[in-house]
Amino acid sequence: MDRMRPCRRCGHPTRVDRMVQGYGRNCAAALGLIGGTVDTGHTGPDLLDLLEIEPEDCCDGWDRPADSDVTGGRRRPG
């Protein structure tokens, strides 16, 4: 049987092998000591898997007006 200790934050008895820096798992997650993940039930490829099969993007900037040269080649003085 594992030893139990109270959580430093809430006092709930927690197994020592499941504590993170003296905090229970829930309190450690609330304090940002461990990252929490959510199982979304996703099946199939994700975006990183598609990088291998997608062609290289070739953007010429026509669809990005912020990157287009609206000054006509003139530069502002200064």
Image: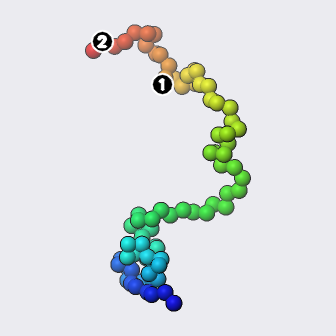
Query: Dot 2, crowdedness within 10 Å: few (<14), some or many (≥20)?
Result: few
Compare marks 1 and 2 and give the one earlier in the sequence: 1
The chosen color scheme is rainbow
Determine contact: label 1, label 2, CB under 8 Å. Answer: no
Mark drawn on residue 41: none
Residue 78: horizontal and vertical position, in percent? Answer: 27, 15
Is 37 rendered above or below residue 13?
A: above
Identify which residue is drawn at 37% across, 76% down: 22
Is 20 rendered above or below residue 6?
A: above
Q: Quadrant of residue 56?
A: top right
Q: What residue is shown with label 1?
A: 66
Identify which residue is drawn at 44% across, 81% down: 16
Using residue 63 as the reference point, say whether residue 50 is left or right of it: right
Q: Quadrant of residue 31?
A: bottom left
Of residues 6 and 70, the one drawn nearer to the viewer in this rendering: 6
Q: What residue is shown with label 2?
A: 77
Of residues 60 and 72, the one drawn nearer to the viewer in this rendering: 60
Circle 1 SS class: helix
Residue 33: horizontal and vertical position, in percent? Answer: 41, 65
Identify which residue is drawn at 65% across, 49% down: 46
Which residue reaches farthest left?
Answer: 78
Amino acid type of the residue that numbered disc 2 sits on in the rendered structure: Pro
3D distance between C-alphas at marks 1 and 2: 20 Å
Is 15 rendered above or below residue 74?
A: below
Any part of residue 27 in sight: no
Residue 59: horizontal and vertical position, in percent? Answer: 59, 25
Amino acid type of the residue that numbered disc 1 sits on in the rendered structure: Ala
Circle 2 SS class: loop
Residue 29: horizontal and vertical position, in percent? Answer: 44, 68
Using residue 69 as the reference point, say whether residue 77 is left or right of it: left
The tally of labels here is 2
Any part of residue 70 in sight: yes
